[in-house]
Image: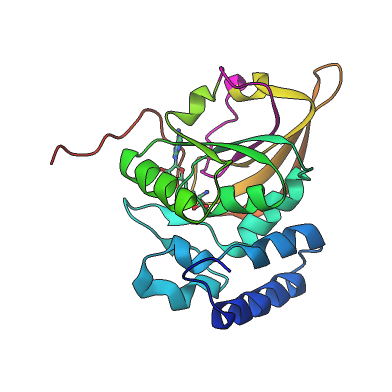
């Protein structure tokens, strides 16, 4: 067991998993991955009790760790296979990246806020997620040096799907993103077929913080 985890928190996770099952998450591999990740260690210590409620929660810099249901839903849509190269836009706390890694994905995750990038990078190392690669950068640009990816996941509200990211997706790959400019977004999944044609499916509505351009550096101390 990871330092900082305990039977108590495992018990809470078990209950959370049951709740997600009741809410319609059926992919057992995804549920087991959420069971394995100690979500309370991705929140400030003072809020550990909140970690296993199915709610989004504020982290620093006005950003959020997504609601467990949302993480489970987006992860299910990606149909992660072991060894998949997955690009995540919006590392935030690092929680979603850890869930993807638990499914055997090779995760490349970009965050635009330097402070969050540094915190999540350190946290993921401390928790033993050594294979997750984190980057400080602008997700609108993707990671051309590491492309193409089997799967791409955007965890901030995208005004539209950046063509740059579609270009970095492999044929037969999925891109999942909350799409829309308003306060609620539609969950969208794009499939790039073998010929490179794009097929779109729409799912329910969700609320995400906006995807913003450029990098936000730390204030000099
Ligand atoms: N996946 C995160 C939740 C992300 S909240 C988790 O599991 O905790 C959305 C994150 O996307 C925020 O941290 C925000 O700073 C980041 N973000 C917004 N626009 C971005 C962009 N263009 N590139 C990279 N990260 C971005």
Confirm whether the magenta stretch covers residue 152: yes
Confirm whether the magenta stretch covers residue 154: yes
Q: Is 197 rendered above or below residue 55? A: above
Q: Judge from the rendering whether residue 19 lies leftward or rightward of residue 172; answer left or right.
A: left
How many marks the image carries: the answer is: 0
Residue 180 falls in image quadrant: top right
Which part of the image, by quadrant, shows the N terminus? bottom right
The chosen color scheme is rainbow
Residue at figure coordinates x 50%, y 26% from the top left:
140
Q: Main secondary structure of the magenta part?
A: loop
Report if residue 157 is visible in the image: yes
Q: Is 45 rendered above or below residue 79? A: below
Q: Is 164 rendered above or below residue 215? A: above
Residue 10 falls in image quadrant: bottom right
Residue at figure coordinates x 50%, y 40% from the top left:
181
User: Foreground residue, 148 or 64?
Assistant: 148
User: Foreground residue, 41 or 113?
Assistant: 41
User: Foreground residue, 194 or 144?
Assistant: 144
Residue at figure coordinates x 38%, y 58% from the top left:
59
User: Foreground residue, 123 or 208?
Assistant: 123
Report if residue 27 is visible in the image: no
Q: Is 22 rendered above or below residue 171? A: below
In the image, farthest residue toward the left: 221
Q: Judge from the rendering whether residue 167 lies leftward or rightward of residue 127; answer left or right.
A: right
Q: Judge from the rendering whether residue 193 lies leftward or rightward of residue 177; answer left or right.
A: right
Q: Position of residue 82 (x, y in %)?
A: 77, 43
Q: Position of residue 33 (x, y in %)?
A: 69, 59
Residue at figure coordinates x 65%, y 64% from the top left:
36
Which part of the image, by quadrant, shows the C terminus? top left
Q: Position of residue 34 (x, y in %)?
A: 65, 63
Q: Position of residue 102 (x, y in %)?
A: 67, 53
Residue range corresponding to the magenta coloring: 144-164
């Amino acid at each position: 067991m990871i330092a900082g985890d305990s039977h108590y928190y495992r018990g809470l996770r078990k209950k959370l998993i049951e709740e997600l099952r009741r809410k319609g998450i059926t992919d057992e591999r995804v549920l087991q991955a959420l069971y394995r990740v100690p979500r309370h260690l991705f929140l400030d210590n003072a809020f550990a009790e909140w970690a296993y409620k199915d709610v989004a929660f504020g982290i620093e810099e006005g950003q959020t760790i997504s609601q467990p249901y949302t993480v489970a839903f987006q992860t299910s849509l990606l149909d992660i296979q072991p060894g998949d190269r997955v690009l995540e836009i919006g590392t935030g706390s690092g929680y979603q990246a850890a869930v993807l890694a638990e499914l055997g994905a090779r995760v490349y995750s970009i965050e635009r806020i330097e402070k969050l990038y540094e915190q999540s990078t350190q946290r993921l190392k401390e928790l033993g997620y050594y294979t997750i690669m984190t980057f400080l950068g602008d997700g609108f640009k993707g990671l051309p040096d590491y492309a193409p990816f089997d799967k791409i996941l955007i965890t901030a509200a995208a005004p539209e799907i950046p063509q740059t990211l579609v270009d970095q997706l492999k044929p037969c790959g999925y891109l999942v993103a909350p799409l829309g400019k308003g306060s609620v977004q539609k969950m969208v999944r794009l499939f790039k077929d073998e010929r490179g044609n794009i097929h779109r499916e729409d799912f329910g509505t969700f609320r995400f913080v906006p995807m913003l351009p450029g990098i936000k550096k730390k204030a000099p101390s």
